[in-house]
Image (cartoon, rainbow, N blue to C red):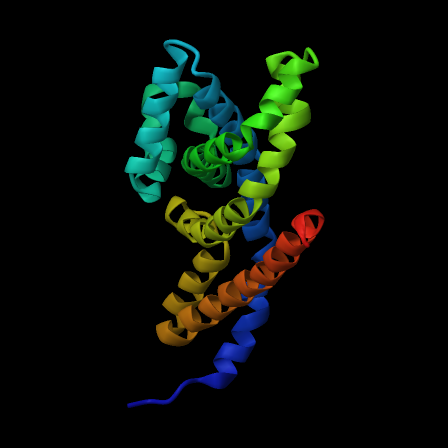
Amino acid sequence: MRGLDIDYMLALVPVILGYVPLTLFMAVAGMAFALILGSLLAVERVVRVPVLDWLVVLFISFFRGTPLLVQLFLFYYGLPQIVSALTQINGVTAAIMGLTLHFSAYMAESIRAAIVGVDRSQWEAAQSIGMTQGQMMRRVVLPQATRIAAPTLVNYFIDMIKSTSLAFTLGVTEMMGAAQKEAAGSFLYFEAFLVVAIVYWIMVEVLSQGQKRMELWLNRAYAR
């Protein structure tokens, strides 16, 4: 039984860290697009536009009911065979698309629950002063729903960062892809994957601490 090759692990750390910006870029881009799409889906689920509501329910059901890895393969390997314009899509773009659609389905339900969780008196007060439904959503309901949904959305962002590790299956050399290549060359698989696991762990812990501070800041007005 051999021991850990600490020197190899220490030498690998800067290599893995060099791919952190790409990992964060995919996560941040995916989060931004998913938040926009998820918010639109959530508002529609509250308003319930005929026919469109059925399509939104189908969208949410599909992307929540199928594995992210399958969706990534579908976008990167499957769709280009049907839509020729997508043959130029690269792994990073496909990964962002997959993350966006997958997590927007989950965010839609969380945001919808947050919107519904806003006290009905707030809705009635907005309507009593003549606000349109759009104005009521933008100025009264969504700002309050943000406080309710924010902790859950941060959790989704943390999950999204970890899910970027699947991008290496599309040929993207991010943190996991870099660890895989280094391990294949050295045959020190345990050390390589342990390093990348620790890096992900540290990133998640930093975000978790930021989440706690954000929750305190959002709830400061409600503290007694």
Quadrant holding the C terminus: bottom right
Residue toward you, 20 or 158: 158
Is residue 49 rendered to the left or right of residue 144?
Answer: left
Q: Position of residue 118 (x, y in %)?
A: 55, 33
Image quadrant in which you'd find residue 49: top left
Above/below status of 124 relative to 33: above
Residue toward you, 179 or 202: 202
Q: Position of residue 206 (x, y in %)?
A: 60, 63
Residue toward you, 55 or 50: 50
Residue appearing at x 36%, y 25% in the figure:
59
Is residue 134 rendered to the left or right of residue 167?
Answer: right
Question: From where the camera sits, is residue 187 visible?
Answer: no
Image quadrant in which you'd find residue 86: top left
Image quadrant in which you'd find residue 55: top left
Residue appearing at x 71%, y 47% in the figure:
221
Above/below status of 209 relative to 87: below
Q: Position of residue 133 (x, y in %)?
A: 60, 14
Residue appearing at x 47%, y 66% in the figure:
196
Q: Position of residue 213 (x, y in %)?
A: 65, 58
Question: From where the camera sits, is residue 215 visible?
Answer: yes
Residue appearing at x 65%, y 53% in the figure:
214
Above/below status of 117 relative to 164: above
Quadrant holding the N terminus: bottom left
